[in-house]
């Protein structure tokens, strides 16, 4: 049985794309790998860009860690000042500030504490100043130590 061939279907149309365009589109979609010389250069370029960006990202992460440590020290100093002021407000003898600071992880050498006894209004005032060390690798030597301060006032209950 003869097969009917439609000559209209076999003719190339203007909508068809040539094979060279297919090849270029395949190289673009494949991110440049396996497309000959251009693909090799793009892979090398990505390696160089990664080598340039990684140190910057590492330094930024270390700076965030250092800022986190300073913020932690600030919170601990505020908590220590409140704890010492509370202890001083309920008893006539001032508590050991060094013991409280060490319990919370502060270095006693960088700590300066002023406990003002009861004033005319009946309040105890505690001022704490702490030199928070900047000792994170790579970033710490670039930054000076940060001084963190806190102050707490409490009514002296033992005078009543």
Image (cartoon, rainbow, N blue to C red):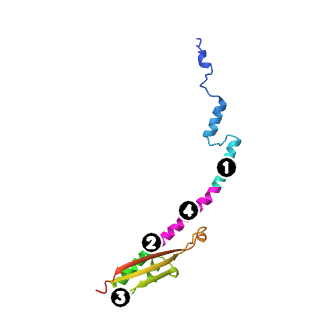
Q: Residue at the bottom extreme?
A: 93
Which mark's residue is nearer the viewer, 3 or 1?
3
Q: Quadrant of the C terminus?
A: bottom left
Q: Residues within 10 Å of mark 1 (few under 14, many from 20)?
A: few
The residue stretch that appears in magenta: 52-73
The answer to the question of whether label 1 and label 2 lie on touching residues, with beta carbons closer than 8 A, is no
Q: Nearer the viewer, residue 117 or 39?
A: 117
Instruction: State the separation of the CA atoms marked 3 and 1.
Output: 71 Å
Instruction: State the separation of the CA atoms marked 3 and 4.
Output: 47 Å
Horizontal and vertical percent for residue 42?
Answer: 66, 46
**Residue carrying label 2:** 75
**Residue carrying label 1:** 45
Main SS category, magenta section: helix
Horizontal and vertical percent for residue 93?
Answer: 38, 88
Instruction: State the separation of the CA atoms marked 1 and 2.
Output: 45 Å
Q: Earlier in the sequence, mark 3 or mark 2?
A: 2
Q: Residue at the front extreme?
A: 120
Quarter-wise, where is residue 122 in the image?
bottom left
Q: Nearer the viewer, residue 5 or 141?
A: 141
**Residue carrying label 3:** 92
Q: Earlier in the sequence, mark 3 or mark 4?
A: 4
Which mark's residue is nearer the viewer, 3 or 4?
3
Instruction: State the separation of the CA atoms marked 3 and 2.
Output: 26 Å
Q: Earlier in the sequence, mark 3 or mark 1?
A: 1
Q: Earlier in the sequence, mark 4 or mark 2?
A: 4
Residue under the point 35% across and 79% down: 154
């Amino acid at each position: 049985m003869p097969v009917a061939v439609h000559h209209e279907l076999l003719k190339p149309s203007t909508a068809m794309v040539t094979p060279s365009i297919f090849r270029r589109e395949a190289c673009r979609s494949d991110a440049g790998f396996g497309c000959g010389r251009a693909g090799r250069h793009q892979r090398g370029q990505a390696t160089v860009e990664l080598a340039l960006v990684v140190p910057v990202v590492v330094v930024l992460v270390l700076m965030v860690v250092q800022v986190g440590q300073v913020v932690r020290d600030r919170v601990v100093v505020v908590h220590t000042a409140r704890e010492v002021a509370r202890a001083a407000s309920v008893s006539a003898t001032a508590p050991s500030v060094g013991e409280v600071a060490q319990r919370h992880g502060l270095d006693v050498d960088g700590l300066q504490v002023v406990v003002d006894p009861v004033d005319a209004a009946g309040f105890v005032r505690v001022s704490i100043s702490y030199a928070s060390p900047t000792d994170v690798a790579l970033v710490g030597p670039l930054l000076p130590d940060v001084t963190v301060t806190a102050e707490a006032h409490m009514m002296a209950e033992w005078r009543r």
